[in-house]
Image: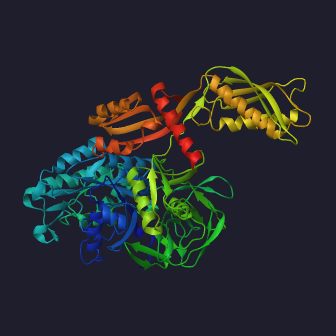
C-alpha cells in the first residue's frame, strides 16, 4: 500500500447498537473499492471483517478492526466497532483515535441505547458526528421518522445529505444532495438525473445544507444573501468546518443488503469529512517540562503515536495498532515508549484488512497502521521521538461488572490458566483476572457475561485448558455490637520447656469503616512489652477468620489491659496463641453479626422499562434512591446487596430486550438480615468442614 499525506487521510469509526449493519456496510465498501470479489456476509461467515472463530460462530463483531480503503485518491481508515455492550472497551479505543464518529442507526428500530452510549464517548472525546440510517429497505420503515428521531433524541444539528428513492420495501436508491445526482438499482448504481418527482425536495435539501454552511462564515453568509452561489469548494470546506464545530452532522441513508447508498457515503467521506490536520490538536504532557502541550498533526514535526489496540496472531505474535499524531514513521525506525521509558524498534509497518496484510513503507501524521513484535508496549502507551518525549492521556475504560470463579480440572493446567488469562488482560483493558486470597479463588471479571464467555472459549481454543466455572464467593465480613472483657491463659507443659502466656482483652465495636485499632494498656509489666506485638499478631490472626462464619472481622478496637507471664515458659508463640484464643472468645460473647457489601447501582433503560427495573431491584433486597429521565431514557439509582447481583447483566438485558445497561460501584457494608445470615453461616461452616477434611 502506498503512503498518503495527512490531507488525504480520513479516520472514521462506525458505531451503534448490535445488528445495525456496520460490518455489512464496510463489506460493501471493500467490494466497491475492488478489495473483494464479492460482498462478504456476516450471516454465512464470509465477511472480510468478522474473521475470528468466535465472531463467525456468534455472527457478531467482537473486536474493533481498522479497515483501510483507498477511494478516489484518499485513504479512508475505517474502524468497525462492536455494537454489543459487552465489548464497549473495543469501541471506546476506536472512538478515541478516530477523527469522525459515524453512528449506524437500524432504520427498523431507530435510535437505541447502544448507539447513545457510543455517542456519549464521542462527545466526551470531542469528536465530529455523522449518521447512517441503514436497512432502509425494511417493509415498514419510515426514513423521515428516523431522521426526526435522530434530531429529537440525539442532535438537532443532524442534516440530511441524501434523500431516499422509494419507501420501505420499495427503497431502491438515494439522491446525493452534494452532487445532485441519483444512484439507484434502476441505473445499475451509476449516477443519473434526479427523478422529476424528487427535484423540488432535492433542491430544498441542498439549500438546507448550503444555509448551514453559510451560517458558519460571515463572508459566505454575505455572499449567499447577496444572491451569489457558493462554489463547490466553499461548500465542501464549509461542511468540514461545520462537522468539526458540531454544527453540521451529516445523515446518510443505505441498504447494505441491496448495496445501495454505500458509494455515496464513501464519496462524502473522501470529499467533505475533515482530514486529521484540520481538527483540534490533541493534548499531551511533555516528559521534559511536565507541562501540557498541543500536538499539531504535522509530518514535519517530531514523531508521536498512540497504541490503541493489540491483537495476537499465532503466525507472527502480537500485533500493535497505533495512530500517528505527529511526524512520520518508517520501517525499521527506533522510537521511544514514553509510557514504559524504553526504546522500541519498529519493524515492518503494515495495514490489515481481515486476514490480509499489506506492507507500508511510511506512515504520515494522522495515519493508522500496525507493527508486530514490540517488546514492551501495550494498549494506552505513547510512542515518541526520544529527543522530544511526550505522553498522551490514557483512555479510561469502564470497570468490569461481572465476575466468575474459574478452577482448572487438573493441577497441571493452573499455570496455563494464569498465563492465558494474563495474556488476554494485555489485549483487553476491560478484562481482569485476580487471585482472591481470602477464598483462594481465581476470579475473572468483564463487562458482561457474553464478554466472559468469549474469553473462556478463546482460552479453551488456544490453550486447550478444561476448567470449571462457578459463582464467586461474596466477601462477607463480621463485626460485633457490644463491648466485652475476656481473658485466656495458654499453658502447656511437655516435659521440657513449656508454654505460658495469659492476656486480658477489652474488645469494643467501632463505627463502620474504622478498621482495626489495637491499644497497649498494660501497666506494671504484667506482660513484658516484648510480648505485646505477639498478642496483637494473635488477635489479627483470629480476626482474619472470624468465629461466626469464618469471614474477616472488621471495625473493632482491642485493648490488652492485663495478663501474666512466666520467666522461663513464656514466648512469642505462647502470647500469640493466648491473643488469638482470647479474641475468638470475645467475638462470640459480643453479639457478632454478619455484614454484606452493598453496591451503588445505576441502571439506564428506555423509560418504558423503568417500572420493571425498580420492581426487580426491590425483589433483590435493593433500595431505589433516585430516578431521572433523559430524552426517552430512565436512569434508576439504587443500592443493592452484591449477593443479589450475580448474573444481573443477563437478567437486565432479557428484561429490556437488550436495551438496558448498568454501572456498579462499592458503597459500604451493612448487616445481613437475620434469616439470611443464618443460612450463610450454616453454608460457611459446612465449607470450612469440607476444607478441613480435604
Q: Total label count?
A: 0
The answer to whether residue 439 of the structure is visible from this angle is: no
| Residue at the front extreme, as displayed | 495
**The N terminus, quarter of image:** bottom left
In-image side of 198 versus 634 (left or right): left
The answer to whether residue 398 of the structure is visible from this angle is: yes
In-image side of 37 versus 505 (left or right): left
Q: Position of residue 662 (x, y in %)?
A: 40, 41
Q: How is the image coloured?
A: rainbow
| Rendered image quadrant of residue 32 | bottom left
| Residue at the left extreme, as displayed | 197
The structure residue drawn at horizontal position 44% and vertical position 53%, both measured from the top left corner, is: 469
Q: Position of residue 541 (x, y in %)?
A: 70, 38
Residue 555 vs residue 338, the one in the foreground: 555
Residue 94 vs residue 641, the one in the foreground: 641
Residue 466 vs residue 332, the one in the foreground: 466
| 187 up-or-down from 417: above or below | below
Q: Position of residue 321 (x, y in %)?
A: 48, 67
The structure residue drawn at horizontal position 38% and vertical position 61%, both measured from the top left corner, is: 12
The structure residue drawn at horizontal position 47% and vertical position 35%, both measured from the top left corner, is: 600
| 354 up-or-down from 285: above or below | below
In-image side of 338 versus 619 (left or right): right
Residue 507 vs residue 245, the one in the foreground: 507
| 81 up-or-down from 1: above or below | above
The structure residue drawn at horizontal position 59% and vertical position 37%, both measured from the top left corner, is: 550
Amino acid at each position: 500500500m502506498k503512503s498518503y499525506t495527512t490531507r488525504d487521510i480520513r479516520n472514521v469509526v462506525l458505531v451503534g447498537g448490535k445488528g445495525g449493519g456496520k460490518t455489512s456496510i464496510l463489506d460493501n465498501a471493500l467490494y466497491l473499492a475492488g478489495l473483494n470479489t464479492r460482498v462478504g456476509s456476516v450471516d454465512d461467515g464470509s465477511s472480510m471483517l468478522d474473521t475470528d472463530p468466535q465472531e463467525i460462530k456468534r455472527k457478531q463483531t467482537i473486536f474493533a478492526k481498522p479497515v483501510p480503503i483507498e477511494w478516489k485518491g484518499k485513504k479512508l481508515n475505517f474502524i468497525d466497532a462492536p455494537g454489543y455492550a459487552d465489548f464497549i472497551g473495543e469501541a471506546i479505543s476506536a472512538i478515541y483515535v478516530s477523527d469522525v464518529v459515524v453512528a449506524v442507526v437500524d432504520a427498523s428500530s431507530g435510535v437505541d441505547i447502544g448507539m447513545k452510549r457510543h455517542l456519549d464517548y464521542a462527545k466526551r472525546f470531542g469528536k465530529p458526528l455523522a449518521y447512517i440510517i441503514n436497512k432502509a429497505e425494511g417493509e415498514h420503515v419510515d426514513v423521515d421518522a428516523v431522521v426526526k428521531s435522530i434530531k429529537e433524541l440525539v442532535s438537532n444539528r443532524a442534516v440530511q445529505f441524501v434523500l431516499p428513492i422509494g419507501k420501505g420495501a420499495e427503497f431502491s436508491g438515494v439522491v446525493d444532495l452534494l452532487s445532485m445526482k441519483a444512484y439507484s438499482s434502476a441505473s445499475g448504481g451509476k449516477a443519473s438525473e434526479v427523478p422529476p418527482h424528487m427535484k423540488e425536495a432535492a433542491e430544498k435539501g441542498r439549500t438546507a445544507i448550503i444555509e448551514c454552511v453559510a451560517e458558519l462564515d460571515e463572508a459566505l453568509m454575505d455572499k449567499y444573501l447577496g444572491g451569489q452561489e457558493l462554489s463547490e469548494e466553499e461548500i465542501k470546506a464549509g461542511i468540514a468546518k461545520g462537522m468539526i464545530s458540531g454544527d453540521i452532522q451529516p445523515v446518510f441513508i443505505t441498504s447494505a443488503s441491496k448495496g445501495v447508498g454505500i458509494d455515496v457515503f464513501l464519496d462524502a467521506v473522501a470529499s467533505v469529512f475533515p482530514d486529521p490536520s484540520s481538527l483540534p490538536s490533541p493534548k499531551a504532557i511533555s516528559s521534559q517540562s511536565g507541562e501540557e502541550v498541543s500536538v499539531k498533526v504535522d509530518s514535519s514535526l517530531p514523531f508521536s503515536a498512540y497504541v490503541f489496540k493489540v491483537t495476537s496472531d499465532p503466525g507472527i505474535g502480537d500485533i500493535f495498532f497505533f495512530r500517528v499524531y505527529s511526524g512520520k514513521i518508517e520501517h525499521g525506525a527506533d522510537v521511544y515508549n514514553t509510557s514504559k521509558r524504553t526504546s522500541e524498534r519498529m519493524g515492518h509497518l503494515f495495514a490489515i484488512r481481515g486476514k490480509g496484510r499489506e506492507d507500508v513503507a511510511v506512515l504520515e501524521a494522522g495515519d493508522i497502521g500496525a507493527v508486530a513484535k514490540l517488546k514492551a508496549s501495550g494498549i494506552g502507551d505513547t510512542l515518541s521521538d526520544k529527543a522530544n518525549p511526550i505522553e498522551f492521556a490514557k483512555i479510561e475504560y469502564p470497570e468490569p461488572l461481572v465476575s466468575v470463579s474459574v478452577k482448572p480440572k487438573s493441577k497441571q493446567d493452573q499455570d496455563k490458566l494464569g498465563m492465558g488469562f494474563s495474556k488476554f488482560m494485555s489485549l483487553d483493558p476491560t478484562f481482569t483476572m485476580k487471585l482472591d486470597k481470602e477464598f483462594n479463588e481465581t476470579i475473572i471479571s468483564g463487562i458482561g457475561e457474553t464478554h466472559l464467555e468469549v474469553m473462556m472459549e478463546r482460552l479453551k481454543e488456544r490453550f486447550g485448558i478444561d476448567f470449571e466455572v462457578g459463582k464467586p464467593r461474596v466477601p462477607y465480613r463480621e463485626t460485633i455490637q457490644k463491648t466485652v472483657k475476656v481473658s485466656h491463659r495458654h499453658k502447656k507443659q511437655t516435659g521440657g520447656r513449656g508454654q505460658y502466656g495469659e492476656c486480658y482483652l477489652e474488645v469494643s465495636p467501632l463505627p463502620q469503616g474504622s478498621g482495626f485499632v489495637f491499644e497497649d494498656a498494660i501497666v506494671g509489666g504484667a506482660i513484658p512489652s516484648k510480648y505485646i506485638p505477639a498478642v496483637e499478631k494473635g488477635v489479627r490472626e483470629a480476626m482474619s477468620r472470624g468465629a461466626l462464619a469464618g469471614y474477616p472481622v472488621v471495625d473493632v478496637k482491642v485493648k490488652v489491659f492485663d495478663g501474666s507471664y512466666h520467666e522461663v515458659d513464656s514466648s512469642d508463640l505462647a502470647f500469640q496463641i493466648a491473643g488469638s484464643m482470647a479474641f475468638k472468645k470475645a467475638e462470640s460473647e459480643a453479639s457478632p453479626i454478619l455484614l454484606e457489601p452493598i453496591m451503588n447501582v445505576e441502571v439506564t433503560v428506555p423509560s418504558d422499562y423503568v417500572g420493571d427495573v425498580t420492581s426487580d431491584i426491590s425483589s433483590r433486597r435493593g433500595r431505589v434512591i433516585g430516578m431521572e429521565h433523559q430524552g426517552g431514557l430512565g436512569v434508576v439509582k439504587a443500592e443493592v446487596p452484591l449477593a443479589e447481583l450475580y448474573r444481573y447483566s443477563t437478567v437486565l438485558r432479557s428484561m429490556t430486550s437488550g436495551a438496558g445497561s448498568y454501572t456498579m460501584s462499592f458503597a459500604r457494608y451493612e448487616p445481613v438480615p437475620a434469616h439470611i445470615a443464618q443460612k450463610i453461616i450454616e453454608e460457611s461452616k459446612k465449607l470450612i468442614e469440607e476444607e478441613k477434611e480435604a
